[in-house]
Amino acid sequence: MQKCNKCRITIRGEKRSCPLCGGRIEGEAENPAFPVLERKAVTTSVFIKMCLFIAVVSEITLGAITVLNMDLFFATGIAAVSILFVLADIFISAYYRGNVIKLVTLQTYLIMFAVYDIDRHFSGRRWSLQYVIPFLFIILMLVTVIIGKSEGLLVRDYVIYIIVDVVLGSLQMIHVINGVNDFPIPAVISAGFLLIMAAYITIFKFNDLKNASMKYLNM
């Protein structure tokens, strides 16, 4: 055990100097009274700050390249948008890593918005509305159910996510009705599949839907 002859105290654990006078201590160190937790080399907060800084530097660099050479506007524009969405995905992953269904749902919505934004501003061919988004809604619905079953969750624990998918997926029909989607078959199939799932839940899982709705409304 270590001790300070000046203060006439004994010191538990391992110290380099006396905690009272800061003077020299004698004796052999012993195991600390409380367990010492290992600190991560890079915490989540530091990692996010590093990613944010890299994203800002990248955006500034891409902006400078675009000003110097406008012929690269298409490539730099896609790169700049991609960086923003990757940064947003990092934030989502860090914040919702404990809730797999919410994490997957938000990441899928982010991908949908990313492909739609890229298609709208840099392509204009509407492939995002015709193919990507309709199939992503179907995949998201199936993945939500699979994750819920694999984690042993009750239906009321994840039914709200399904209902939100149904509501947002049905909005595809706005583009179909307005004639924006030139190839509406995948969107109609996707919206129909989602509505069938909504009908199944409403008819056969009404109590779970009711309990989940009351839970989230109370929150």
Image (cartoon, rainbow, N blue to C red):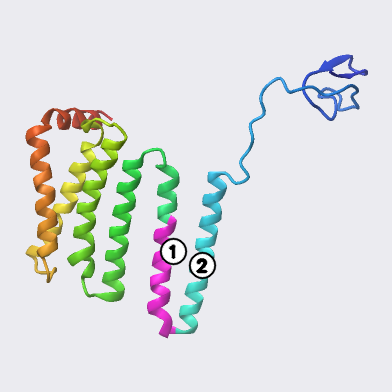
Quadrant occupied by the N terminus: top right
Q: What x and y, as percent, mark residue 46?
A: 57, 48
Q: Amino acid at mark 1?
A: Ile
Residue 136 counted in the magenta span: no
Q: Residues within 10 Å of mark 1 (few under 14, many from 20)?
A: some
Task: Say above or below: 148 vs 196.
Answer: above
For the point 25% across and 32% down, which residue is it? Answer: 157
Q: Which quarter of the figure has residue 14?
A: top right
Find out whether the residues at labels 2 and 1 contact each other: C-beta distance under 8 Å: yes
Disc 1 target residue: 83
105 displayed left or right of 181: right
Span of residues in magenta: 70-87
Q: What x and y, as percent, mark residue 194?
A: 13, 49
Q: In the displayed orientation, state which residue is furthest to the front.
A: 150
- Secondary structure at badge 2 equals helix
- Secondary structure at badge 1 equals helix
In the rendered structure, find residue 58 and report the number of the disc placed on it: 2
Q: What x and y, as percent, mark residue 139?
A: 23, 52
The numbered mark, 2 or 1, whose residue comes first in the sequence reads 2
For the point 38% across and 71% down, which residue is it? Answer: 78
Q: How many marks?
A: 2
Quadrant occupied by the C terminus: top left
For the point 28% across and 75% down, which residue is it? Answer: 123
For the point 24% across and 30% down, which residue is it? Answer: 154
Q: Main secondary structure of the magenta part?
A: helix
